[in-house]
Image (spheres, grey):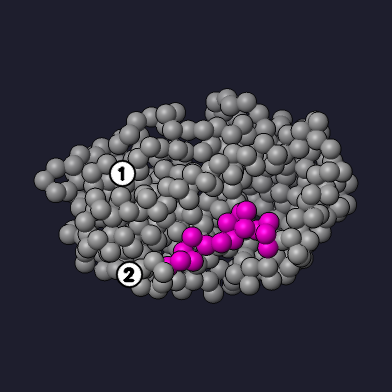
Amino acid sequence: MAIKGRVLISGAGIAGLTLAICLKEYGEDPVVVEQSPELPDQGYMMDFFGSGWDVAERLGLTDKLRALRYPIDKLQFVNADGKPYTSVPIKRIKRALDGKYVYVRRPDLVRILFDHAKSLGVQVRFGKEIADLRERDGHVDVTFDDGSSDEFALVFGADGVHSGVRRLMFGEENQFARFLGAYVAAFHIEDHDLPVRRTAQIHEEPNRVAFYYPLGERSLDATFVFRLDEVDVPPDQQLSFVRRAFKGSGWIAEMLFDAYKGTAPLYFDTLTQIAIPRWSRGRVTLLGDACGCLTLLAGQGSHMAMAGAYLLAQELQRYDGNHAAAFTSYEAMMKPEIAARQEDAAAFAKIFMPTAQSKPWLRRLVIHAAFNPLVLPFALRYFGSRSILENENEDGEEA
C-alpha cells in the first residue's frame, strides 16, 4: 500500500468505480459513497472504444462488454419517413478499430464496473452523500448527510457534472459551467411495435436530433438532443419540455412519446461542460465529469473518465502515496487532453444539429463521406479512437 489509510470516492459512476477498481488492485482500501439509493439506471447508448477500451482491456472487462450483444447490425441516417440516406454496417466501424468497439448503454457499463469492484471487495455505500470536508492532521474529516462522520487519507470527487465535492472545495457550479446551448434526454421503451429492428437510427431536423437503438425484438433506447436557451426545468416538467421540443418531428419521435410509460425521462440534463482552473486542493481531487465534463457531443466522455481514473491511480503508486506530487502529475497529463476535447466538442455543438439555414444535401454528402471505408479511420480519430494510453507500457512508465 502506497497510501497510508482508507480513501473515499464520492460517486458510483464510471470514473468513481474505475478508480476504486484500480486502487484496489494496487492494494489500497477505497470506500465508495453514492447519493442514490441504488446503482443509477440513468443514461444513454454510447460508442465504446479508444481510451475506454484500453482501460477495460487492462482491467479484464472486454469479454463482458462484448457479451452484451445488442441486436444492432447497422447504423442508418433516416429521413422523416424512416427511409435511410446513409447506411453503415457496424462491422465496418469495428474493422476500422481493429475489433475494439462495442455499443454499450451507460447503465450497463456502470453495472459491469460495479460488479467487478464488488468482486474485488470494494465497499460501496448507497444513499450517502458528503456534506462537509475538513482537512487536518494528515487526513480529511468527512461528515455525511445522515450526520455520521469518518476520516480518510484522501477524498476523490467523482460525482459528476453537478459535483457536491467540487462545490464544497471550490464553490458553486455556475463558476465553472459552459452551457453549449442544448439539452439531452433519454428513455427506454419496452414492448413496442415500432419499425426499428437490428438498426440504430439517427433522424435529424433543424435544431433537434433523435437517436434510436434496438435492445431486443420489442425494446429500444431513445436519445433526444435539441437546441434551446437555458431555462430551469423542474423534474415533473422534463418530459413535457422534451415532448414540446419534438412536436411535429418526423419518423417515430412522437410515437415514442405516446408509447413511453414513465412520467419523466430516465435521463435529462443540459449539455454543459465543466472547466475548472485547478482539480485538487490538499488531500481532495476531482476526476471525470466533476472537473472536465466533455458532454456526449464529444463521443468520449466515458473513455476519458476511465482513462483519468486509471492514470490517477497509477500516479499515486508511482509517487508512493505522495498525493501532492501524484495529483500534480495526473492533472498535467489529463488537463491538456480534456481541454482539447472540450474545444472540439464546443465547435462540434455548433454543427452537430442542422439549422433552418443548413443545406440538407450538403450535410448528407458530408455524413456519407465520413463513413466511407477509406475516410472512416480518420473520422474516428476525431472522436477519440487514439487512446491516450498508447504511449504507456504495462508497468505504467511512459514509452
Image point (72%, 70%), residue name = 91
C-alpha separation, residue under disc 2 versus residue under disc 1: 23 Å
Q: Which image quarter: residue 242?
A: top right
- In this rendering, is residue 233 above or below 210? above
Which numbered marker is on residue 280?
A: 1
In this rendering, position of residue 186 left or right of residue 39 = right
User: Please, which residue is most extreme toward the front here?
Assistant: 399
Of residues 141 and 340, which is closer to you in this image?
A: 340
Under circle 2, the secondary element is helix
Image point (47%, 38%), residue name = 274
Residue identifier under label 2: 25
Q: Which amino acid, mark 1?
A: Ser
Image spot of residue 60 (x, y percent): 46, 73
Under circle 1, the secondary element is strand
Of residues 262 and 299, which is closer to you in this image?
A: 299
Q: Which residues are magenta?
A: 377-392
- In this rendering, is residue 276 above or below 365? above
Where's the C terminus, which quadrant? Answer: bottom left
Image spot of residue 211 (x, y percent): 71, 49
Of residues 90 and 145, which is closer to you in this image?
A: 90
